Image: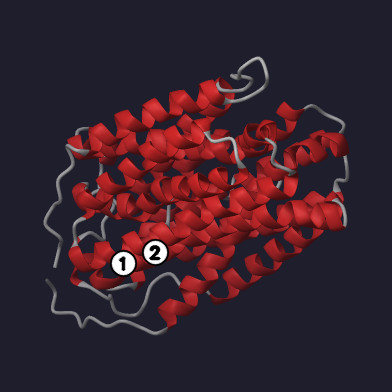
């Protein structure tokens, strides 16, 4: 300990809001085709799979780009690292509307937007550590995760309404303009870190170590968390991408699909808020991970057979609560159990694992249906995977928090 004065700054909340708004934009651009898959296929004159690929590409590019983004953030800091991502997201988000109905051009633009994703996702815990004291880190991380979920919810809920009231081009323009504006705001107003640190912890771990990946994969708790992330994030990416194709055969309209997608994310937002608050107060992260995993198992088995709008709405909400509430708790738990690995490295590796599973689940379950087109077989397999994930979570133990 150096004796340096510890201090928190009110500006941390301004930065958190800006970071959240930028996160919202990125997630909207990612998910904006999911609830209008059929309409987008007509607009771009392609098949359903080509539209699904516009979302899947985010997971594909994340894997190689994540390693560069992690190095870049560790090297140049939060402001420059995430600022680069914010501007790429803004510029190409706005360009998306200008390419018109040319599918290959929009695919190129979507690929460029996806390159910004690792800079946001890999920096969540780093931002919390730089600006927030230990007693607020779960809350800050939770709000960052919530902003991602809120962006997905807005994209799912608002997109079919905008397409129905106007058309796909108007929807793309609104989302693109927002992305460009928030990208500019981010670059102007964000700061890397405060003049003095908010906690002792930041001074203990403020070095980039060698052999970080080796330390991660030799850590048994990281191995378990990695498996939970593999199943959870992969399942969420698959459900989010296929949501219209999954529930449309069960009688839901496009607007009802959007409503269900919104409820899925609302469950995650409420769950992340509740779990992050409890984690800060009780410091029982391992227990909360187990509870969220159990809720996920039950919800997946119920939603596999649900065939009424009301039941799909309810179980969709619970599934979102189970799958997504655990996100911020897992990220902060991983930071603690993998010390001294930098936050961008541990967070980034988890996201890489989730992206790999997302690709495998999306491509592997494509067309994996009953003869009537119901995705019941795929949902049953995801239910079994979630059960295995829950059983693995039983081996997690809390670690002593740093003071």
Badge 1 marks a residue whose secondary structure is helix
Badge 2 marks a residue whose secondary structure is helix
Q: Are marks 2 and 1 in contact (CB under 8 Å)?
A: yes
Residue 192 sits in quarter: bottom left
| Residue that numbered label 2 is attached to | 273
Residue 269 numbered mark, or none? none
- Up-down relation of residue 199 to residue 78 (above or below): below
Position of 366 compared to 46: left or right? left
Position of 63 compared to 30: left or right? left
Seen at 51% across and 62% down, the residue is 147
Seen at 42% across and 51% down, the residue is 321
- Relative depth, front residue between 317 and 329: 317
- The percent coordinates of residue 15 (x first, y second) are 48, 74
Image quarter of the C terminus:
bottom left
- The percent coordinates of residue 16 (x first, y second) are 46, 71
- The percent coordinates of residue 390 (x first, y second) are 28, 36
- Up-down relation of residue 144 to residue 217 (above or below): below
Image quarter of the N terminus:
bottom left
Residue 277 numbered mark, or none? 1
Seen at 43% across and 32% down, the residue is 301
Give the Cα distance between marks 2 and 1.
6 Å
Seen at 35% across and 67% down, the residue is 139
Question: Can the viewer see residue 318 in this picture?
Answer: yes
Question: Can the viewer see residue 339 in this picture?
Answer: no
Position of 400 compared to 33: left or right? left
Q: How is the image coloured?
A: secondary structure
């Amino acid at each position: 300990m150096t004796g340096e004065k510890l201090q928190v700054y009110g500006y941390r909340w301004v930065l958190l809001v800006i970071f959240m708004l930028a996160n919202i934009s990125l997630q909207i651009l990612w998910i904006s085709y999911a609830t209008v898959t059929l309409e987008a296929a007509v607009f771009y004159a392609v098949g359903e799979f080509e539209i699904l690929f516009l979302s899947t590409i985010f997971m594909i590019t994340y894997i190689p780009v994540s390693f560069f983004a992690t190095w870049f953030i560790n090297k140049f800091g939060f402001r420059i690292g995430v600022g680069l991502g914010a501007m790429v997201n803004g510029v190409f988000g706005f360009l998306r509307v200008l390419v018109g109905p040319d599918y290959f051009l929009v695919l190129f633009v979507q690929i460029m937007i996806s390159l910004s994703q690792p800079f946001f996702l890999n920096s969540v815990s780093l931002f919390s550590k730089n600006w927030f004291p230990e007693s607020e880190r779960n809350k800050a991380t939770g709000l960052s995760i919530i902003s991602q979920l809120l962006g997905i919810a807005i994209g799912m809920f608002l997109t079919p309404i905008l397409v129905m009231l106007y058309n796909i081009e108007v929807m793309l323009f609104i989302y693109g303009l927002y992305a460009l504006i928030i990208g500019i705001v981010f670059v102007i107003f964000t700061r890397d870190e405060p003049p003095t640190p908010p906690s002792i912890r930041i001074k203990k771990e403020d070095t980039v170590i060698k052999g970080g990946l080796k330390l991660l994969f030799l850590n048994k708790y990281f191995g378990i968390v990695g498996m939970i992330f593999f199943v959870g994030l992969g399942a969420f990416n698959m459900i989010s991408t296929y949501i219209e194709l999954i529930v449309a055969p069960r009688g839901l309209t496009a607007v009802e699909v959007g409503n269900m997608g919104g409820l899925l994310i609302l469950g995650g937002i409420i769950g992340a808020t509740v779990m992050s608050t409890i984690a800060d107060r009780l410091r029982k992260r391992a227990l909360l991970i187990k509870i969220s995993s159990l809720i996920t198992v039950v919800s997946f088995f119920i939603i596999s057979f649900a065939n009424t709008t009301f039941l799909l709405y309810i179980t969709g909400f619970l599934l979102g609560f189970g799958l997504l509430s655990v996100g911020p708790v897992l990220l902060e738990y991983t930071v603690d159990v993998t010390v001294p690995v930098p936050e961008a490295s541990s967070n980034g590796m988890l996201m890489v694992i989730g992206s790999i599973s997302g690709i495998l689940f999306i491509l592997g379950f494509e067309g994996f249906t009953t003869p009537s087109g119901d995705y019941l077989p795929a949902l049953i397999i995801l239910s079994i995977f979630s059960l295995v994930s829950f059983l693995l979570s039983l081996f997690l133990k809390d670690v002593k928090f740093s003071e």
